[in-house]
Image (cartoon, grey):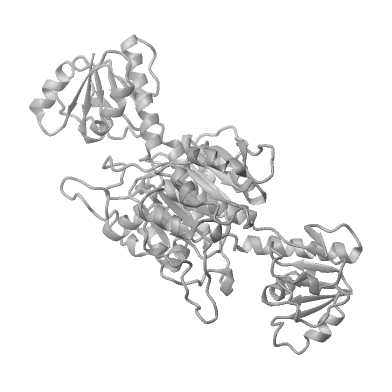
């Protein structure tokens, strides 16, 4: 069988994935820039690994498995796929995101950036030896998780071990895990927000969640609350969030996902049309939370296992759609 | 019965716990012991002394039966100048703050938080981004944490680290059963066997003859080349020259240092914490000996002190008894 790694994202994972494949699979790496090369590669491919599939791609008559090497399948136009294809995604990033959220809430409550920068510059201002001010802790605080899926659970049990009261809001009703004190239906999100010292966004981007955190909901949050966005930028309203942070409607934000990303035309854009980088109450990172050694290994193993399953005619995992 | 609160920290404590103290207990507060003309009279009739120190040249305090330290350490009390038979008690409440600090430092070092957020904010760099298939960073899951000093703080660290899915080892002077997710407790004499296994080493030990210079050039060389050191104990537990060289030369991966080898003095209020420029090293997180200094810690410590004073007044068993003078 032949597997094609299509595009930069898939190509970057080709080495670890092929390393974990045990069945006989030929692999080929191709970009999406040259239609002739792409047509040749797809003509006899049974497996394609890619984050994007668009209308107008050359025919792939033998394609059976379209494996997205990440969780989000929003780059795949399912209607543009040939018949008889199984679309699968991959996980493995949940522990990395769980760690990232906890790191951010600790860094915020402990004022790590302020204190480390001040001391690096030579000031003992924050030290009890000179009667400096105290800082906060996360233990005993209330953490609200919007979207209690794989990632939300990873955040919940670590936060519970730190002595936090954990609340969650979820679209569908779920059994309450031991780490969570209460689950709110999404229709009662506003009520949950008012109770939280930290709000973690870990839901998928859908029509319902686009702009979910808008001006009204930001105003419903505590004035010293921290918003952590690990999900997708547009779940928060860009203008409203910038204003809320600038004007102190909420305490701060740790943002790893954005409204603007690098493109061929603009390889290094600022991540928003607003200057979030000028706000001192924002911890900002370039959508790096899933990009750990551990995620790469877990995800590569999962993808390789799915390819082996296809070769052996076994049932596939992480099926998103069948055409 | 009378309690004397002596010094700035004790004075703050007195104001914080006033409503919790037993009825009928007289309270005297002296913010500044040295210059205060009231000290001889205040010391003469105090039954309880709440302070962080006592000096041999202070006026006599013949009636004191409870010496309540406002800190964990009682090393600043010159005890021979206080009555024989007095109970010496200390206070804790800092475990949560310090354990959280260690978990935070471990995460920030593995995830390269300062480097990534700094270059994104300042230069708009996407080179570590997932969408660019950028340079990956580490995570705590699957790594090994070694806790040197498995006491109150060490146990709280283990409890919080366990759900991260890391292996937890500990080294302790006296033997202890492994609990709270710790897989194995090494005797401190076998520290050299634990160090090469660790991705993070957290120093939570007291400073004593056995721990001064414990982490020296030889032991730093035993650590993994990418390993991180977190020190919340005391500066001199680590050899100052050796750790500076190890961080500068990347013998180890990085460090979070909260405790130092030198401190500000009235003559030199802006003195750096070391004779070496740790503040110039990008792989070090530096904080000014405040890992335990949180509002929660102050409240818990006040509550312990108020509780103990109440016990003393009612003639009940004391908590946090360090020694009888």
Rendered residue at 47%/74% (across/down): B271
* Residue toward you, A219 or B55: B55
| A149 in relation to A305, above or below | below
Q: Quadrant of the N terminus of chain A?
A: top left
- The image quarter containing residue A28 is top left
In the rendered image, residue A283, in percent from the top left (x then y), is placed at 40, 57
Residue positioned most to the bottom: B37
Rendered residue at 46%/51% (across/down): B217
Residue positioned most to the top: A313
* Residue toward you, B213 or B154: B213
Residue positioned most to the left: A36
Q: Is residue A159 visible?
A: no
* Residue toward you, A231 or A131: A131
How many numbered marks have been drawn onto this rendered protein structure? 0
Rendered residue at 54%/77% (across/down): B265
- The image quarter containing residue B7 is bottom right
Q: Is residue B274 visible?
A: yes
Q: Quadrant of the C terminus of chain A?
A: top left
* Residue toward you, A100 or A251: A100
In the rendered image, residue B267, in percent from the top left (x then y), is placed at 52, 82
| B41 in relation to B150, above or below | below
- The image quarter containing residue B19 is bottom right
The answer to whether residue B43 is left or right of residue A8 is right
In the rendered image, residue A151, in percent from the top left (x then y), is placed at 47, 38
The answer to whether residue B307 is left or right of residue B294 is right
In the rendered image, residue A157, in percent from the top left (x then y), is placed at 56, 40
């Amino acid at each position: 069988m032949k597997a094609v790694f299509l595009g930069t994202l898939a190509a970057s994972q080709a080495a670890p994935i092929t390393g974990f494949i045990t069945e006989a699979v030929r692999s080929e790496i191709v970009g999406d820039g040259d239609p002739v090369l792409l047509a040749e590669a797809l003509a006899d491919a049974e497996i394609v690994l890619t984050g994007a599939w668009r209308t107008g791609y050359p025919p792939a008559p033998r394609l059976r498995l379209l494996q997205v090497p990440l969780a989000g399948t929003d780059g795949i136009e399912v209607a543009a796929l040939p018949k008889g294809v199984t679309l699968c995604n991959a996980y493995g990033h949940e522990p990395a995101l769980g760690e990232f959220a906890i790191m951010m809430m600790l860094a915020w409550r402990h004022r790590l950036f302020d204190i480390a920068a001040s001391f690096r510059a030579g000031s003992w201002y924050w030290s009890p030896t000179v009667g400096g001010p105290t800082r906060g802790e996360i233990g005993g605080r209330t953490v609200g998780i919007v979207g209690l899926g794989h990632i939300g659970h990873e955040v919940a049990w670590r936060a519970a071990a730190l002595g936090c009261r954990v609340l969650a809001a979820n679209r569908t009703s779920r059994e309450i895990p031991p780490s969570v004190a209460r689950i709110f239906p999404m229709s009662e999100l506003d009520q949950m927000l008012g109770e939280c010292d930290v709000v973690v966004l870990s839901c998928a981007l859908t029509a319902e969640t686009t702009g979910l955190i808008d001006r009204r909901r930001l105003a419903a949050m505590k004035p010293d609350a921290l918003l952590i966005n690990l999900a997708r930028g547009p779940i928060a309203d860009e203008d409203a969030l910038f204003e809320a942070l600038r004007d102190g409607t909420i305490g701060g934000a740790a943002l790893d996902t954005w409204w603007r990303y690098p493109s061929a035309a603009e390889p290094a854009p600022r991540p928003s049309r607003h200057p979030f980088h000028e706000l001192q109450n924002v911890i900002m990172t370039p959508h790096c939370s899933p990009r750990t050694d551990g995620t790469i290994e877990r995800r590569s193993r999962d993808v390789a296992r799915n390819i082996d399953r296809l070769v052996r005619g076994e049932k596939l995992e992480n099926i998103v759609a069948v055409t | 019965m009378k309690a004397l609160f002596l010094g700035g920290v004790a004075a703050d404590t007195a104001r914080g716990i006033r409503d919790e103290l037993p009825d009928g207990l007289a309270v005297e507060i002296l913010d500044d012991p040295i210059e205060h003309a009231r000290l001889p009279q205040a010391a003469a009739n105090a039954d309880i002394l709440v302070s962080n120190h006592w000096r041999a040249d202070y006026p006599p305090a013949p009636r004191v039966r409870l010496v309540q330290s406002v800190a964990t350490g009682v090393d600043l009390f010159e005890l021979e100048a206080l009555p024989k038979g007095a109970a010496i008690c200390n206070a804790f409440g800092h475990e949560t703050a310090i354990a959280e600090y260690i978990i935070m430092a471990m995460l920030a070092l593995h995830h390269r938080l300062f480097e990534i957020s700094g270059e994104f904010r300042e230069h708009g760099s996407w080179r570590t981004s997932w969408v660019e298939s950028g340079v990956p960073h580490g995570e705590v899951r699957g790594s090994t944490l070694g806790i040197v000093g498995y006491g109150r703080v060490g146990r709280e660290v283990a409890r919080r680290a366990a759900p991260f899915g890391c292996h937890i080892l500990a080294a302790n002077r006296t033997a202890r059963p492994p609990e709270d997710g710790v897989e194995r407790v090494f005797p401190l004499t076998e520290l050299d066997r634990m160090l090469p296994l660790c991705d993070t080493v957290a120093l939570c030990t007291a400073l004593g003859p056995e721990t001064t210079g414990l982490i020296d050039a030889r032991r730093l060389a035993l650590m993994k080349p990418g390993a991180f050191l977190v020190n919340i104990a005391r500066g001199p537990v680590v050899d100052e020259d050796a750790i500076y060289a190890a961080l500068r030369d990347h013998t180890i991966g990085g460090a979070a240092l909260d405790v130092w080898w030198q401190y500000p003095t009235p003559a030199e209020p802006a003195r750096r914490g070391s004779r070496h420029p740790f503040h110039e090293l990008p792989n070090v997180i530096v904080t000014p000996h405040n890992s335990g200094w949180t509002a929660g810690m102050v409240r818990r410590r006040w509550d312990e002190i108020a509780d103990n004073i109440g016990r003393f007044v009612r003639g009940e068993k004391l908590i946090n008894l360090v020694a009888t003078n």
